[in-house]
Image (spheres, grey):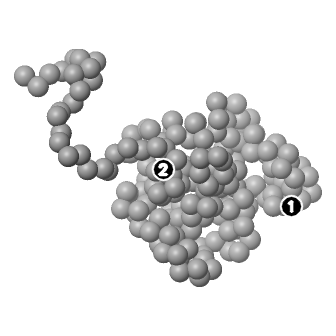
């Protein structure tokens, strides 16, 4: 199964499991798109310049560019994350600590920071934290960080026009005439209009 498909499944979970509101997500996306449209360089309010570079690389590992759409960075996910860190200060320590954990783990294994590691080295570290059920107990902090990071990446990406197009979402379109729910769907659900 492709990583993008796994993320789509994760996003189908009830919205109650998310810790941000739809309005916050849309506001963050709007701010990122406005900054991009103005062609002004993004100036983070939370991340340091080095952290932002790491966030960009990591977000693009989670959602890379493919034949259907751009990457997480193309969609403005790092800007979204920066906004969310300011809007939700309770997440700041975990985010900054998780980014530092990645660098420390890479230093221990490869004597390099995450950004200086090869793709294979980055993958080796991320594989140890990306699958919670298979992760070793000593990676618990990394697993918690990566779960949160992956969720923020997915929320940021799939609330943009690029992400909605990637999902091939057909909602939010006007319908000239509504004939009700199709009979096959009613039958499957075991309900009727009676």
In the image shown, does 114 or 139 lie closer to the viewer?
114
Give the side of residue 176 with respect to residue 26, left or right.
left
Is 123 located above or below residue 22 in the figure? above
Crowd around label 2: few <14 · some 14–19 · many ≥20 (10 Å) = some
Q: Secondary structure at mark 2?
A: helix
Q: Quadrant of the N terminus?
A: top right
Crowd around label 1: few <14 · some 14–19 · many ≥20 (10 Å)? some
- Mark number, residue 16: none
Q: Which residue is mark 1?
A: 116
Real-space CA distance between mark 1 and mark 2, rounded to the nearest whole angstrom: 33 Å
* Residue 184 position within the rendered picture, expressed as x and y whole percent measured from the top left: 26, 20
Query: In x, y percent, where is residue 165?
Result: 48, 50
Residue lying at 70% horizontally and 30% vertically, measured from the top left: 134
Q: Is residue 149 visible?
A: no
> What residue did someone put label 2 on?
165
Which residue is at 74% across, 45% downward? Answer: 126
First in sequence, mark 1 or 2: give its number: 1
Q: Closer to the observer: label 1 or label 2? A: 2
Which residue occupies 39% across, 40% down?
14
Say which element carries label 1. helix
Whether 38 is drawn above or below 139: the answer is below
Q: Is 193 left or right of 77, judged from the image as shown?
A: left
Residue name at image x 38 percent, y 44 percent: 170
**Direction front: furthest residue:** 176
């Amino acid at each position: 199964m492709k990583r993008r498909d796994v993320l789509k499944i994760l996003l189908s979970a009830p919205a109650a499991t998310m810790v941000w509101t739809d309005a916050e997500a849309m506001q963050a996306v709007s701010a990122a798109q406005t900054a991009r449209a103005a062609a002004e360089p993004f100036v983070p309010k939370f991340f340091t310049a080095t952290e932002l570079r790491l966030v960009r690389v990591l977000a693009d590992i989670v959602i890379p560019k493919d034949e259907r759409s751009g990457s997480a960075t193309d969609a403005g996910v790092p800007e979204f994350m920066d906004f969310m860190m300011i809007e939700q200060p309770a997440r700041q320590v975990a985010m900054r600590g998780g980014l530092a954990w990645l660098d420390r783990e890479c230093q221990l294994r490869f004597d390099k920071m995450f950004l200086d590691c090869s793709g294979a080295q980055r993958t080796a570290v991320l594989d140890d934290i990306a699958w919670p059920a298979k992760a070793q107990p000593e990676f618990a902090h990394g697993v918690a960080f990566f779960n949160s990071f992956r969720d923020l990446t997915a929320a940021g990406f799939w609330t943009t026009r690029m992400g909605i197009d990637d999902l091939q979402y057909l909602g939010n379109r006007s319908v000239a005439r509504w004939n009700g729910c199709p009979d096959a769907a009613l039958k499957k659900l075991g309900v009727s209009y009676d």
